Image (spheres, rainbow, N blue to C red):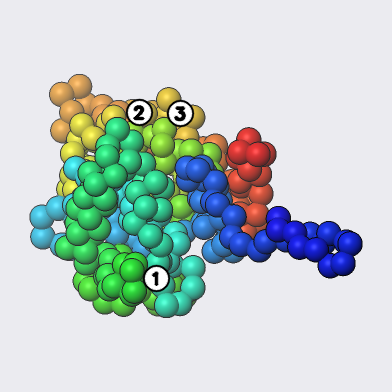
Amino acid sequence: MRGYCLGMTSVTRPTFGATSAPSGRPPRETFLEQMLTGTKRGFVPIRRTFLQKPRGTEGSRGAQLAQLTANPSALDAYLLLHALASSSEPYQANYPVATWVQLLRLDEAASETAAKSRWSKVITKLTDLGLIGRARTGNHMQYLLLDESGNQSPYVRPQTVAHGNYFKLPYTYWADGYDRTLTHPEKLMLLIGLDQKDDFSLPFNQAHAWYGVSENTARRGLRGLEEHGLIASSSTHEPSPKSPNGWAEIIRYTMTGPFSQNAIAKTVKSRGKTLFASQGEAAR
Protein backbone atom coordinates (compact mmCIF):
# COMPACT_ATOMS: atom_id res chain seq x y z
CA MET A 1 0.00 0.00 0.00
CA ARG A 2 1.20 3.57 -0.69
CA GLY A 3 0.16 6.74 1.23
CA TYR A 4 0.19 10.50 0.57
CA CYS A 5 -0.86 13.57 2.53
CA LEU A 6 -3.81 15.85 1.69
CA GLY A 7 -3.67 18.73 4.15
CA MET A 8 -3.53 17.13 7.55
CA THR A 9 -5.09 13.84 6.35
CA SER A 10 -3.08 10.79 5.34
CA VAL A 11 -4.77 8.86 2.53
CA THR A 12 -3.89 5.28 1.71
CA ARG A 13 -4.59 3.84 -1.73
CA PRO A 14 -4.19 0.26 -2.98
CA THR A 15 -1.51 -0.90 -5.37
CA PHE A 16 -3.03 -3.05 -8.11
CA GLY A 17 -1.11 -5.90 -9.65
CA ALA A 18 -1.19 -9.60 -10.48
CA THR A 19 -0.77 -12.06 -7.66
CA SER A 20 1.71 -14.89 -7.90
CA ALA A 21 0.44 -18.30 -8.99
CA PRO A 22 0.55 -21.05 -6.34
CA SER A 23 3.67 -23.18 -6.41
CA GLY A 24 3.38 -26.54 -8.12
CA ARG A 25 0.73 -27.76 -10.53
CA PRO A 26 -2.85 -28.65 -9.55
CA PRO A 27 -3.54 -32.36 -8.95
CA ARG A 28 -3.86 -34.57 -12.01
CA GLU A 29 -7.39 -35.55 -10.96
CA THR A 30 -8.48 -31.91 -11.02
CA PHE A 31 -7.53 -31.63 -14.68
CA LEU A 32 -9.21 -34.93 -15.54
CA GLU A 33 -12.43 -33.79 -13.92
CA GLN A 34 -12.44 -30.40 -15.64
CA MET A 35 -11.57 -31.76 -19.07
CA LEU A 36 -13.84 -34.81 -19.12
CA THR A 37 -16.89 -33.15 -17.55
CA GLY A 38 -16.39 -30.36 -20.06
CA THR A 39 -17.36 -32.78 -22.83
CA LYS A 40 -20.87 -32.96 -21.31
CA ARG A 41 -21.17 -36.73 -21.66
CA GLY A 42 -20.17 -39.80 -19.69
CA PHE A 43 -18.48 -42.02 -22.23
CA VAL A 44 -16.30 -42.10 -25.34
CA PRO A 45 -17.60 -43.94 -28.43
CA ILE A 46 -14.94 -46.05 -30.15
CA ARG A 47 -15.61 -47.79 -33.44
CA ARG A 48 -15.14 -51.52 -33.72
CA THR A 49 -12.70 -50.90 -36.56
CA PHE A 50 -10.17 -49.86 -33.92
CA LEU A 51 -10.26 -53.41 -32.54
CA GLN A 52 -10.84 -55.57 -35.55
CA LYS A 53 -10.69 -55.63 -39.32
CA PRO A 54 -13.75 -56.87 -41.28
CA ARG A 55 -14.53 -60.56 -41.69
CA GLY A 56 -12.78 -62.13 -44.64
CA THR A 57 -9.55 -60.24 -43.98
CA GLU A 58 -6.55 -62.40 -44.84
CA GLY A 59 -4.47 -63.36 -41.83
CA SER A 60 -5.12 -61.85 -38.41
CA ARG A 61 -8.08 -59.50 -38.11
CA GLY A 62 -6.21 -57.44 -35.55
CA ALA A 63 -6.51 -53.71 -36.28
CA GLN A 64 -4.95 -50.61 -34.69
CA LEU A 65 -5.35 -51.95 -31.16
CA ALA A 66 -2.99 -54.77 -32.10
CA GLN A 67 -0.38 -52.15 -33.03
CA LEU A 68 -0.49 -50.82 -29.47
CA THR A 69 -0.06 -54.11 -27.60
CA ALA A 70 3.57 -53.23 -26.87
CA ASN A 71 3.00 -49.51 -26.20
CA PRO A 72 0.97 -48.88 -23.02
CA SER A 73 1.53 -45.11 -22.98
CA ALA A 74 0.34 -44.73 -26.57
CA LEU A 75 -2.89 -46.61 -25.79
CA ASP A 76 -3.48 -44.45 -22.69
CA ALA A 77 -2.86 -41.31 -24.75
CA TYR A 78 -5.18 -42.39 -27.55
CA LEU A 79 -8.09 -43.20 -25.24
CA LEU A 80 -7.83 -39.84 -23.47
CA LEU A 81 -7.34 -37.88 -26.69
CA HIS A 82 -10.32 -39.66 -28.17
CA ALA A 83 -12.48 -38.85 -25.15
CA LEU A 84 -11.59 -35.16 -25.26
CA ALA A 85 -11.59 -34.60 -29.01
CA SER A 86 -14.57 -36.67 -30.16
CA SER A 87 -17.27 -34.83 -28.20
CA SER A 88 -17.74 -31.94 -30.65
CA GLU A 89 -16.47 -30.56 -33.93
CA PRO A 90 -13.80 -29.91 -35.10
CA TYR A 91 -12.80 -33.00 -33.08
CA GLN A 92 -9.52 -31.72 -31.77
CA ALA A 93 -7.73 -31.20 -28.47
CA ASN A 94 -5.34 -28.38 -27.73
CA TYR A 95 -3.51 -28.42 -24.40
CA PRO A 96 0.10 -27.69 -23.41
CA VAL A 97 2.58 -30.56 -23.44
CA ALA A 98 2.97 -30.20 -19.68
CA THR A 99 -0.72 -31.04 -19.23
CA TRP A 100 -0.56 -34.15 -21.41
CA VAL A 101 2.60 -35.28 -19.62
CA GLN A 102 0.91 -34.96 -16.23
CA LEU A 103 -2.36 -36.61 -17.30
CA LEU A 104 -0.51 -39.64 -18.69
CA ARG A 105 1.94 -39.77 -15.77
CA LEU A 106 4.89 -39.56 -18.13
CA ASP A 107 6.65 -37.36 -15.61
CA GLU A 108 6.84 -40.08 -12.98
CA ALA A 109 10.49 -40.89 -12.22
CA ALA A 110 11.54 -38.72 -15.16
CA SER A 111 12.98 -35.26 -15.70
CA GLU A 112 10.92 -32.61 -17.48
CA THR A 113 12.98 -33.07 -20.63
CA ALA A 114 12.64 -36.86 -20.55
CA ALA A 115 8.89 -36.63 -19.93
CA LYS A 116 8.37 -34.34 -22.91
CA SER A 117 10.48 -36.68 -25.04
CA ARG A 118 8.22 -39.56 -24.01
CA TRP A 119 5.17 -37.57 -25.05
CA SER A 120 6.74 -36.80 -28.41
CA LYS A 121 7.34 -40.51 -29.04
CA VAL A 122 3.79 -41.38 -27.99
CA ILE A 123 2.15 -38.87 -30.29
CA THR A 124 4.48 -39.83 -33.15
CA LYS A 125 3.32 -43.44 -32.75
CA LEU A 126 -0.35 -42.41 -32.92
CA THR A 127 0.35 -40.20 -35.92
CA ASP A 128 2.18 -43.01 -37.72
CA LEU A 129 -0.84 -45.26 -37.12
CA GLY A 130 -3.13 -42.71 -38.74
CA LEU A 131 -5.16 -42.23 -35.57
CA ILE A 132 -4.15 -38.63 -34.88
CA GLY A 133 -3.21 -35.63 -36.99
CA ARG A 134 -1.23 -32.71 -35.57
CA ALA A 135 -0.53 -29.08 -36.41
CA ARG A 136 1.12 -26.26 -34.49
CA THR A 137 -1.02 -23.31 -33.43
CA GLY A 138 1.00 -20.60 -31.73
CA ASN A 139 3.00 -22.13 -28.90
CA HIS A 140 0.88 -25.27 -28.69
CA MET A 141 0.43 -28.37 -30.77
CA GLN A 142 -3.10 -29.12 -31.87
CA TYR A 143 -4.19 -32.77 -32.11
CA LEU A 144 -6.91 -33.72 -34.56
CA LEU A 145 -8.80 -36.98 -34.18
CA LEU A 146 -8.92 -39.22 -37.27
CA ASP A 147 -10.99 -42.29 -38.07
CA GLU A 148 -10.38 -45.24 -35.71
CA SER A 149 -9.45 -47.57 -38.57
CA GLY A 150 -6.23 -45.66 -39.19
CA ASN A 151 -7.11 -45.00 -42.84
CA GLN A 152 -6.28 -41.29 -42.39
CA SER A 153 -9.85 -40.17 -43.14
CA PRO A 154 -11.45 -37.39 -41.04
CA TYR A 155 -13.20 -38.42 -37.85
CA VAL A 156 -17.01 -38.43 -37.85
CA ARG A 157 -18.84 -38.96 -34.58
CA PRO A 158 -20.89 -42.17 -34.90
CA GLN A 159 -24.58 -41.35 -34.57
CA THR A 160 -26.24 -43.73 -37.02
CA VAL A 161 -25.69 -47.32 -38.17
CA ALA A 162 -24.15 -45.95 -41.36
CA HIS A 163 -21.38 -44.41 -39.26
CA GLY A 164 -20.21 -47.84 -38.10
CA ASN A 165 -20.66 -50.00 -35.02
CA TYR A 166 -19.04 -48.72 -31.85
CA PHE A 167 -18.67 -49.57 -28.17
CA LYS A 168 -18.73 -47.23 -25.19
CA LEU A 169 -15.84 -46.73 -22.80
CA PRO A 170 -17.41 -45.00 -19.76
CA TYR A 171 -15.62 -42.16 -18.03
CA THR A 172 -15.67 -44.41 -14.97
CA TYR A 173 -12.45 -45.73 -16.49
CA TRP A 174 -10.73 -42.46 -15.48
CA ALA A 175 -12.95 -41.30 -12.61
CA ASP A 176 -12.40 -44.53 -10.65
CA GLY A 177 -8.71 -44.73 -11.54
CA TYR A 178 -8.78 -47.83 -13.73
CA ASP A 179 -6.47 -46.09 -16.17
CA ARG A 180 -3.88 -46.26 -13.36
CA THR A 181 -4.62 -49.60 -11.72
CA LEU A 182 -5.25 -51.92 -14.65
CA THR A 183 -2.31 -53.58 -16.35
CA HIS A 184 -1.82 -53.20 -20.08
CA PRO A 185 -3.17 -56.70 -20.91
CA GLU A 186 -6.21 -55.95 -18.74
CA LYS A 187 -6.84 -52.70 -20.61
CA LEU A 188 -6.58 -54.45 -23.97
CA MET A 189 -9.08 -57.10 -22.97
CA LEU A 190 -11.36 -54.53 -21.32
CA LEU A 191 -11.76 -52.74 -24.65
CA ILE A 192 -12.42 -56.01 -26.45
CA GLY A 193 -14.90 -57.09 -23.77
CA LEU A 194 -16.82 -53.82 -24.00
CA ASP A 195 -17.49 -54.56 -27.65
CA GLN A 196 -19.16 -57.88 -26.79
CA LYS A 197 -22.65 -58.86 -25.74
CA ASP A 198 -23.13 -60.59 -22.40
CA ASP A 199 -22.08 -64.24 -22.25
CA PHE A 200 -19.47 -63.99 -25.00
CA SER A 201 -16.78 -66.54 -25.77
CA LEU A 202 -13.16 -65.73 -26.57
CA PRO A 203 -10.90 -68.80 -26.70
CA PHE A 204 -7.34 -67.84 -25.77
CA ASN A 205 -5.96 -69.58 -28.85
CA GLN A 206 -8.16 -67.42 -31.11
CA ALA A 207 -7.13 -64.07 -29.63
CA HIS A 208 -4.38 -63.47 -32.17
CA ALA A 209 -6.45 -64.47 -35.20
CA TRP A 210 -9.40 -62.35 -34.09
CA TYR A 211 -7.68 -59.34 -32.51
CA GLY A 212 -3.93 -59.57 -33.05
CA VAL A 213 -3.44 -60.14 -29.30
CA SER A 214 -1.24 -62.99 -28.12
CA GLU A 215 -2.75 -65.97 -26.33
CA ASN A 216 -0.75 -65.16 -23.19
CA THR A 217 -1.90 -61.52 -23.21
CA ALA A 218 -5.54 -62.56 -23.59
CA ARG A 219 -5.25 -65.05 -20.73
CA ARG A 220 -3.55 -62.61 -18.36
CA GLY A 221 -5.91 -59.79 -19.31
CA LEU A 222 -9.15 -61.70 -18.84
CA ARG A 223 -8.02 -63.33 -15.62
CA GLY A 224 -6.87 -59.97 -14.29
CA LEU A 225 -10.23 -58.36 -15.07
CA GLU A 226 -11.93 -61.18 -13.21
CA GLU A 227 -9.73 -60.60 -10.17
CA HIS A 228 -10.72 -56.92 -10.26
CA GLY A 229 -14.40 -57.90 -10.35
CA LEU A 230 -14.87 -56.35 -13.79
CA ILE A 231 -15.75 -59.53 -15.64
CA ALA A 232 -17.45 -62.79 -14.67
CA SER A 233 -16.84 -66.16 -16.27
CA SER A 234 -18.64 -69.46 -16.45
CA SER A 235 -17.63 -72.68 -18.15
CA THR A 236 -19.43 -75.57 -19.79
CA HIS A 237 -18.30 -78.62 -21.75
CA GLU A 238 -19.50 -79.27 -25.26
CA PRO A 239 -18.91 -82.26 -27.56
CA SER A 240 -15.82 -81.78 -29.72
CA PRO A 241 -14.43 -84.34 -32.17
CA LYS A 242 -11.10 -82.52 -32.05
CA SER A 243 -10.67 -83.05 -28.32
CA PRO A 244 -8.80 -86.21 -27.14
CA ASN A 245 -11.56 -86.97 -24.62
CA GLY A 246 -14.39 -85.81 -26.88
CA TRP A 247 -15.23 -82.73 -24.79
CA ALA A 248 -14.11 -79.11 -25.06
CA GLU A 249 -14.37 -76.59 -22.24
CA ILE A 250 -16.14 -73.39 -23.32
CA ILE A 251 -15.57 -70.34 -21.13
CA ARG A 252 -18.04 -67.47 -21.43
CA TYR A 253 -17.64 -63.95 -20.10
CA THR A 254 -19.87 -61.07 -19.09
CA MET A 255 -18.70 -57.58 -18.19
CA THR A 256 -19.62 -56.69 -14.60
CA GLY A 257 -19.36 -53.85 -12.10
CA PRO A 258 -18.95 -50.36 -13.59
CA PHE A 259 -18.43 -51.85 -17.05
CA SER A 260 -21.62 -53.92 -17.16
CA GLN A 261 -24.20 -52.93 -19.76
CA ASN A 262 -26.57 -51.65 -17.07
CA ALA A 263 -23.89 -49.53 -15.40
CA ILE A 264 -22.79 -48.02 -18.70
CA ALA A 265 -26.41 -47.24 -19.60
CA LYS A 266 -26.80 -45.30 -16.34
CA THR A 267 -23.55 -43.43 -16.97
CA VAL A 268 -24.71 -42.47 -20.45
CA LYS A 269 -28.05 -41.27 -19.11
CA SER A 270 -26.44 -39.15 -16.38
CA ARG A 271 -23.96 -37.69 -18.90
CA GLY A 272 -21.21 -38.37 -16.38
CA LYS A 273 -22.29 -35.55 -14.04
CA THR A 274 -21.63 -37.41 -10.79
CA LEU A 275 -18.66 -39.57 -11.76
CA PHE A 276 -16.02 -37.33 -10.23
CA ALA A 277 -17.98 -36.34 -7.11
CA SER A 278 -15.98 -38.47 -4.68
CA GLN A 279 -12.68 -37.48 -6.25
CA GLY A 280 -13.56 -33.82 -6.05
CA GLU A 281 -14.34 -34.03 -2.36
CA ALA A 282 -11.07 -35.90 -1.75
CA ALA A 283 -9.08 -33.26 -3.64
CA ARG A 284 -10.60 -30.47 -1.56
Q: Which mark is residue 92?
A: 1
Q: Position of residue 130 (x, y in %)?
A: 22, 67
Between the residue at mark 1 and the residue at mark 2, the CA separation in whole angstroms equals: 36 Å
Which quarter of the figure has residue 234? top left
Outermost residue to the left: 59
Task: Give the labeled residue for mark 2.
Answer: 223
Q: Nearer the viewer, residue 133 or 18?
A: 18
Hey, what amino acid is under mark 1? Gln
Q: Nearer the viewer, residue 29 or 5?
A: 5
Q: Earlier in the sequence, mark 1 or mark 2?
A: 1
Callout 3 crowding tier (Cα within 10 Å): few <14, some 14–19, many ≥20: some
Dots 3 and 1: beta carbons under 8 Å? no
Q: Residue at x 45, y 38 (%)?
A: 178
Hey, what amino acid is under mark 3? His
Outermost residue to the front: 7
Q: Secondary structure at mark 1?
A: strand
